[in-house]
């Protein structure tokens, strides 16, 4: 009997995020950026993205729901972001946007440069 209880609890920890918890945001400014994802309200997602950005110049540049978002940056200061139905499409479009803004060596920022929300 205890095995079933443990399994049920573990299954609850990895269950998909409820559809209502599918708000994310990206904040950019002052050479910093911050994401948030899987939040019940858009307002909370925006607040957390600003906190994760950690720079007083940060502003919300994009919100998204039930999608993947990506942020690309180049050493010359060019940047690009995008959201799309899947991670690869978001990364590709963010790179295209970065190059279109004059980036020479655009890369999607790792460890926080892309997020999938509510998927």
Image: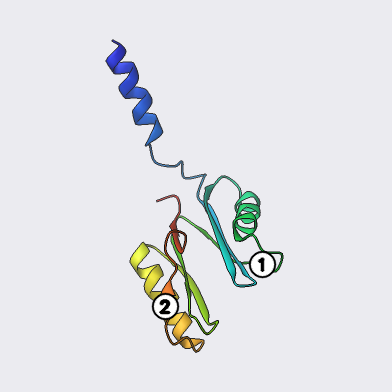
> Mark 1 — residue?
59
- The image shows residue 78 at horizontal and vertical percentages of 53, 82
* Local crowd size for mark 1, using a 10 Å CA cut-off: few (<14), some (14–19), many (≥20): some
> Mark 2 — residue?
95
Q: Quadrant of the N terminus?
A: top left
Question: Where on the picture, by quarter, is residue 34?
Answer: bottom right
- The image shows residue 25 at horizontal and vertical percentages of 56, 59
In the depicted structure, whether residue 6 falls above or below residue 40 = above
Residue at the (46%, 41%) spot, across then down = 18
In the depicted structure, whether residue 27 falls above or below residue 81 = above
Quote the CA–CA distance across marks 1 and 2. Answer: 20 Å
Residue at the (44%, 87%) spot, across then down = 104
Question: Where on the picture, by quarter, is residue 3?
Answer: top left
The residue most toward the front is 75
Residue at the (52%, 60%) spot, across then down = 64
- The image shows residue 67 at horizontal and vertical percentages of 44, 59
* Local crowd size for mark 2, using a 10 Å CA cut-off: few (<14), some (14–19), many (≥20): many
Residue placed most toward the observer, 53 or 27:
53
Question: Where on the picture, by quarter, is residue 13?
Answer: top left
Comes first in the chain, label 1 or label 2: 1
Tell me how the rendering is colored.
Answer: rainbow
In the depicted structure, whether residue 10 falls above or below residue 49 = above
Task: Find numbered disc 1 in the image and state the secondary structure of the residue it sits on.
Answer: strand
């Amino acid at each position: 009997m205890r095995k079933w209880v443990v399994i049920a609890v573990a299954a609850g920890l990895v269950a998909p995020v409820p559809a209502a918890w599918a708000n994310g945001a990206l904040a950019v400014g002052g050479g910093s950026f911050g994401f948030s994802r899987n939040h019940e309200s858009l307002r909370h997602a925006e607040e957390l993205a600003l906190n994760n950005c950690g720079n007083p110049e940060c502003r919300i540049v994009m919100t998204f729901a039930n999608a993947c978002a990506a942020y690309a940056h180049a050493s010359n200061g060019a940047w690009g972001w995008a959201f799309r139905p899947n991670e690869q499409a978001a990364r590709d479009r963010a790179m295209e946007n970065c190059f279109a803004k004059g980036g020479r060596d655009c890369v999607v920022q790792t460890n926080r440069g892309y997020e999938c929300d509510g998927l």
